[in-house]
Image (spheres, rainbow, N blue to C red):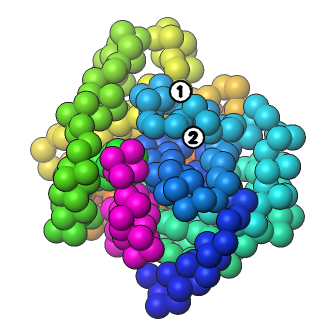
Amino acid sequence: MTNNFIPALREQLSSPKNIVVIPHKNPDGDALGSCLGWKHFLDQMGHNCTVISPNEYPKFLDWIPDQETIIKFNQEEEACQKLLFDADLIFTFDFNSLGRIKPMDEVINKCKGIKVMIDHHEQPDDYADLMYSDPSLGSTCEMVYNVMEALDVSKINKTIATCIYTGIVTDSGSFRFQSTTPITHSIVSNLLDLGIDHAQIHQNIYDTYSFGRLQLLGKALSNLVKVEPLQAVYITLSQEDLNSCDFKKGDTDGFVNYGLSLEGIELAIIMIENTQENIVKMSFRSKGTFNVNEFARKHFNGGGHNNAAGGASHESLAITKEKVHQTILEYKDQLS
Ligand code: 5GP
Ligand code: MN
């Protein structure tokens, strides 16, 4: 955090403001947890705060406190535009480029409100007036906690702690990724002291599979391919696979990680066909030094973190799969 971030933010929040908080498209636990935690914090400070999501989020997040107050841009565009144009302050959480909230980016570019970015992705764009970017931290929720602590730690209550914990636990792979630090655990210790029900939160997130979702996992695992002789695997899921398992948004979240659970594997990729949007959505995960942010940026119109990134292909699933296979082979020196 730069030295002037907190004083500048404190100044902006010194009188009641109209505020909008925005997560990235297809928001995950970290994006929603950070936005809603921050909304609860700002509500207590007497601000008028609304969370606007570019679109819907998965069912396994539809229990986070106050999620029902989130307005979806793709459902209520006019109401969202009004809120955005009237906002004194616009917070953007858990993304580093306005391209991650399309088509809301066109509205944001015309808004007069002060823009504040809090995010932990590599190579952030320069669109915000105030920016707290730290790719070394495991979650945006950890960053939002740091900001709340600096502003007024006494306002962090159990509801806020529940939101923040959700983002920390989901983005850290339940505390197992490299980005988990002693500070992460010490923040979590404070959250537990505030009385959060961590076992229930875990159940809400991870133990609410539908029958179709578990069947889809079965299909994903049986479609797993190893790129011999390298330490890399990929999974494909066609639109037909999804349809046959009554696919709902979020059902494939986490599937890519199963590839990394194989001994020795350093790169795992999942490709998911979406015939409606005419894209193949991709997720990249790695262990150790293989940098999937660079890989996704260079070859698949994406980006993210060193060990977790996303991207998309506009080719067919078959062509994308072949491109992935051949591209992985180009990295034989790093993946042997
Ligand atoms: P996931 O694979 O879970 O969708 O995303 C992994 C990470 O990469 C997340 O931090 C996410 O924000 C980022 N990410 C996912 N898709 C994209 C994309 O299309 N472009 C960029 N720049 N980042 C992405
Ligand atoms: Mn995140």
Q: Amino acid at mark 1?
A: Lys
**The residue carrying mark 2 has its beta carbon less than 8 Å from ligand 1:** yes
Q: Residue at x 20, y 50 (%)?
A: 192
- Numbered label attached to residue 249: 1
Establish if 13 lies above or below 187: below
Q: Is residue 136 magenta?
A: yes
Establish if 291 lies above or below 188: below
- Numbered label attached to residue 26: 2
Q: Position of residue 11 (x, y in %)?
A: 61, 81
Q: Is residue 118 magenta?
A: no
Q: Residue at x 33, y 28 (%)?
A: 204
Establish if 9 lies above or below 91: below
**CB under 8 Å between callouts 2 and 1?**
yes
**The residue carrying mark 1 has its beta carbon less than 8 Å from ligand 1:** no
Q: Position of residue 92 (x, y in %)?
A: 61, 61
Tell me, yes or no, if residue 142 can be seen here: yes
The residue segment tinted magenta is: 134-161
Could you give the CA–CA distance between mark 2 and mark 1, rounded to whole angstroms? 9 Å
| Residue at the farthest left position | 263
Work out which quarter of the rendered image holds the C terminus and state it: bottom left
Helix, strand or loop at mark 1: loop
Answer left or right for 74 relative to 70: right
